Amino acid sequence: MTQHLANSPESGDIFAGLEAGLDAPTDKGPGNFDAHHPPDKALIDDCVHCGFCLPTCPTYALWGEEMDSPRGRIYLMDMVREGAASLDEPLVRHFDTCLGCMACVTACPSGVQYDKLLESMRPQIERHHERGRADRTFRELIFALFPYPRRLRVAALGGLFYQRSGLAGVVRRRRLLDRLPPRLRALEALLPPVKVRDLVASPPERVAAVGTPRRRVAVLTGCVQRVFFTGVNAATVRTLAAEGCEVLIPRDQECCGALSMHSGREPEALERARRTIATFEAYDVDAIVVNVAGCGSTMKEYGTLLRDDPEWADRATAFSAKVRDVTEVLAELEPRAPRHPIQARVAYHDACHLGHAQRVRAAPRAVLRTIPGVEVVDLPEAELCCGSAGVYNLLEPEAASDLGQRKAANVRSVHPDAVATANPGCLLQMRRHLDDPDLPLLHPIELVDASIRGEVLPTEK
């Protein structure tokens, strides 16, 4: 038994019906799958087991275990489909430890669509695998909190008290955290600095374009982004407006469903997708702008996710066609707002769901290079995930920590003045493992905004 399997969540009684998606379809599918979109045999057979994916797979890089590689996991899917394996704890662990980073999709010379295979595998697991008490309780805690900005704000107030009262220092000096389970230690370690102004910030519903309008866009404000990274949203709106975009910010928007979808909680994710579509359909815009890589990748797939729903399939496809990462929008617009120089060596980290899932790599770099004085540098082992992967760094803290430390070492090796990445989870993960208050970690849009406004890097203030 490998170490990561030995550290799997402890078993226990099952909270029947508590977790979204446990009501499994009754139709029998191939092997030990049900009939609702099991992993497609044709997609499974596309894998020729060449091994090009192995160096890019984070878990294979950590453990060197064949069943913790993309081709190994595809083999397991095939075994379940043929009835030679079941969705038991050892098999499920190999999929729980997959980050879903999709680096293998980028690396594969045969065009294997591991993203689609994993997207069909995880709901099957959630419908048919009974998790232990501790695991299920923690997962329910996550999904009762993170998709709800109001609840997050309440939790953030507790974090603010924890940080400012001196309690955090006492806890660490007395090593009280060592007594907590790894998942709770990770939750504490990833808590970002909390600011009161962020908790009370409320963006306007409309911001006019500066000068002659060039586009009309709506912005997704996100969940974690809305509470802990309000500066990124503010910079997004200011920069789009400065570049001639009329910006609309729907007040009643909710979670887009990305975290749920990436965790196999399909019914929950689809309901959130429908609500998001309905919210943004009320706005006649050229693009729906997203500044969170994970959200953007899911929203671009709404057409596929809702393909079985005759009422929503066409609406979802039309919606997804409008979804654009903020760097895509800016890269398409000839810069209008003057940029002031920022003399900085900026290490750019490709967020997995932007670089691998959305295949948006050139746009962020091009946007950063519109800033005079900025030198954009890539990281060694750029294809390897930082270990954030949605809520992976909470559910699999040991593996995530190993990857976070590896990413931090690669960041330090290029001696940057700042680090830029387009996902809040990556920012939190790298902040934890770099542990360097003098090294700014920023969304690319924050650097562009600072340049337009004539500001400097935070460490220069």
Image (cartoon, rainbow, N blue to C red):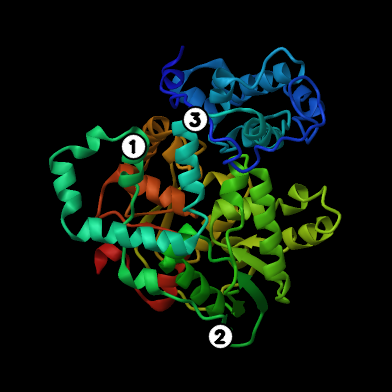
Q: Residue furthest right?
A: 310
**Quarter where residue 336 is shown:** bottom right
Sooner in the amino-acid sequence: mark 2 or mark 3: 3
Residue 125, given in percent of the width and then of the height, sits at 64, 30
Residue at the spot of label 1: 409
Which residue is nearer to you in this view: 394 or 319? 394
- Mark 2 vs mark 3, foreground winner is 3
Sooner in the amino-acid sequence: mark 2 or mark 1: 2
Residue 241, given in percent of the width and then of the height, sits at 55, 79
Q: In this view, does 377 lie above or below 246?
A: above
Residue 240, given in percent of the width and then of the height, sits at 56, 74
Q: Which residue is drawn at 28% across and 61% down?
A: 160
Can residue 354 be seen here? The reply is no
Residue at the spot of label 2: 210
Residue at the spot of label 3: 58
**Element carrying mark 1:** helix
The crowd level at tag 1 (other Cα within 10 Å; few <14, some 14-19, many 20+) is: some
